[in-house]
Image: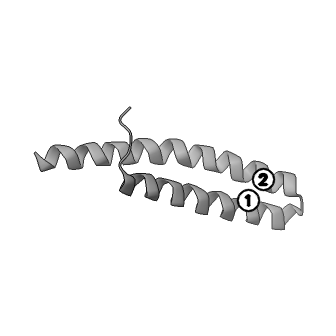
Amino acid sequence: MVSLNTKYSGILWVNVAALSLGVGFLVYKKWDNIGYGAGAGLAIGAVEYVFMRFSLARKQAREENNDN
């Protein structure tokens, strides 16, 4: 797979961090258990990373093809 450029790499990590922290915090507040919050944050972060990584790679490839 092609590596992402700086623009898309930044978008990817900001989205993953924001979603992971948000979900982790909400789960922690709901059940008052740091382990549940951390687990939920890691799980949603992994899923978000996979889907956003492939999505941004396709978008970058389309942009590069349109520039030619």
Q: Residue at x 14, y 48 (%)?
A: 66
Q: Which residue is drawn at 56% across and 55% down?
A: 16
> Among all residues in the image, which is located at the extreme left?
68
Residue 41 rendering spot, x and y as whole percentages: 70, 53
Q: Residues within 10 Å of mark 1 (few under 14, many from 20)?
A: many
Badge 1 is on which residue? 24
Q: Looking at the image, which is closer to me, 9 or 62?
A: 9
Residue 23 rendering spot, x and y as whole percentages: 69, 60
Q: Looking at the image, which is closer to me, 50 or 9?
A: 9
Q: Earlier in the sequence, mark 1 or mark 2?
A: 1
The answer to whether 44 is drawn above or below residue 15 in the figure is: above
Asked if residue 7 lies left or right of residue 39, the reply is: left
Residue 37 rendering spot, x and y as whole percentages: 79, 56
Three-letter code, disc 1: Gly
For marks 1 and 2, give the CA distance.
6 Å
Q: Looking at the image, which is closer to me, 31 or 34?
A: 34
Residue 25 rendering spot, x and y as whole percentages: 75, 65
Asked if residue 47 lies left or right of residue 28, the reply is: left
Q: Is mark 2 on a helix, strand or loop?
A: helix
Q: What element carries label 1?
A: helix
CB atoms of marks 1 and 2 within 8 Å: yes
Question: In what quadrant of the picture does the N terminus appear?
Answer: top left
Colour convention of the picture: one colour
Question: In what quadrant of the picture does the C terminus appear?
Answer: top left
Q: How crowded is mark 2: few (under 14 residues within 10 Å), some or many (20 or more)?
A: some
Three-letter code, disc 2: Ala
The answer to whether 39 is drawn above or below residue 32 in the figure is: above
Q: Residue at x 60, y 58 (%)?
A: 17
> Among all residues in the image, which is located at the extreme front?
6
Badge 2 is on which residue? 38
Q: Residue at x 68, y 45 (%)?
A: 43
